[in-house]
Image (tube, rainbow, N blue to C red):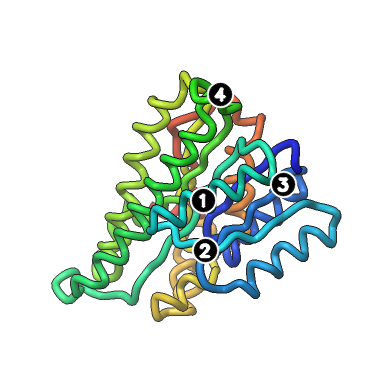
Amino acid sequence: MSAKTVLITGASRGIGRATALGAAKQGWGVVVNYQHDQVAAESVVEQIRAADGQAWAVQGDVSVEADVLRIFDEAERRGALTGVVANAGIVAPGALLADMPLERLRRMFDVNVLGAYLSAREAARRMMTSRGGQGGSLVLVSSMAAVLGSPGEYVDYAGSKGAVDSLTIGLAKELGPEGVRVNAVRPGLINTEIHASGGRPDRAWALGVHTPLGRPGTAEEVASAILYLLGDDASFITGTFLDVAGGRR
């Protein structure tokens, strides 16, 4: 059992993985959620345990309510749940909205919107002080796409992250009196595997050179922002957005 436990969805790779490793270094017990890649998730767990940390891998699809309930139940069995990072998300190959099939749109919103809302709902249920929780911190992973709109590439993805921004604002007001802070990070061009799933593995580098800082960001840089919002140093911060985008707007 861990004195404090954080659940991170989509933690087998990229930003989620970096956040899991960083949280473990700060003394959190880490529940590593994954959907498909058990080998990658177990690798994260093994790395944390090798450094004398506590971690557990839990499979589940955040767009499926039964899976989300099970994921949170498993997390609570590991210790007091006082941190949740709703990170799981997908992107698709660049396309005009006019050319996007229904199947793509439905999956995008199922994972990125419904998945975020289900994860946030369960975080609220488990951490609200009026329902027996200890309070805590929920960090939602949005995107600068919510601000920029991603025309010609991912307007569906951008819209899904716009919904996450709205969730952040409203839920922070709901849960503030319940001892739960709600914030979001908005990564920009970050050099992770997600770009390959969108058909452009070099996208972060190709576009990152045009940011004010002249490069793409790293998963670890985003993780640092998430961990700040999770921790006590951000104790008077809720309902806000931390853009990790190298100045790109």
| Image side of residue 167 versus residue 134, left or right | left
Tell me the residue at 54%/32% (across/down). Answer: 127
**Residue lying at 60% horizontally and 59% vertically, measured from the top left:** 58
Q: Which residue is mark 3?
A: 29
Tell whether label 2 touches label 1 (CB within 8 Å). yes
Which amino acid type is shown beneath numbered disc 4? Answer: Phe
Image: 183 above or below 149? above
Going by the numbered disc 3, the residue's amino acid type is Gly
Q: CA distance from mark 2 to mark 3?
A: 26 Å
Q: Which residue is mark 1?
A: 244
Say what amino acid the circle numbered 2 marks: Ile
Residue 169: x and y in percent read: 37, 33
Q: Secondary structure at mark 3?
A: strand
Can you identify the residue that label 2 sits on?
190
Q: Nearer the viewer, mark 4 or mark 2?
A: 4
Instruction: Classify mark 4: helix, strand or loop.
Output: loop
Circles 2 and 3: CB atoms closer than 8 Å = no
Identify which amino acid the numbered label 1 is placed on.
Answer: Val
**Upstream in the sequence, badge 4 or badge 2?**
2
Marks 3, 1: nearer the viewer: 3
| Marks 1 and 4, the one that precedes in the sequence | 4
Between disc 1 and disc 4, the foreground one is: 4
Q: CA distance from mark 3 to mark 1?
A: 25 Å
Horizontal arrangement in the rendering, residue 60 relative to residue 90 (left or right): right
Q: Are marks 3 and 1 in contact (CB under 8 Å)?
A: no
Image mark for residue 236 = 4
Q: Dividing the image into 4 quarters, which one contains the N terminus?
A: top right
Image quadrant in which you'd find residue 11: bottom right
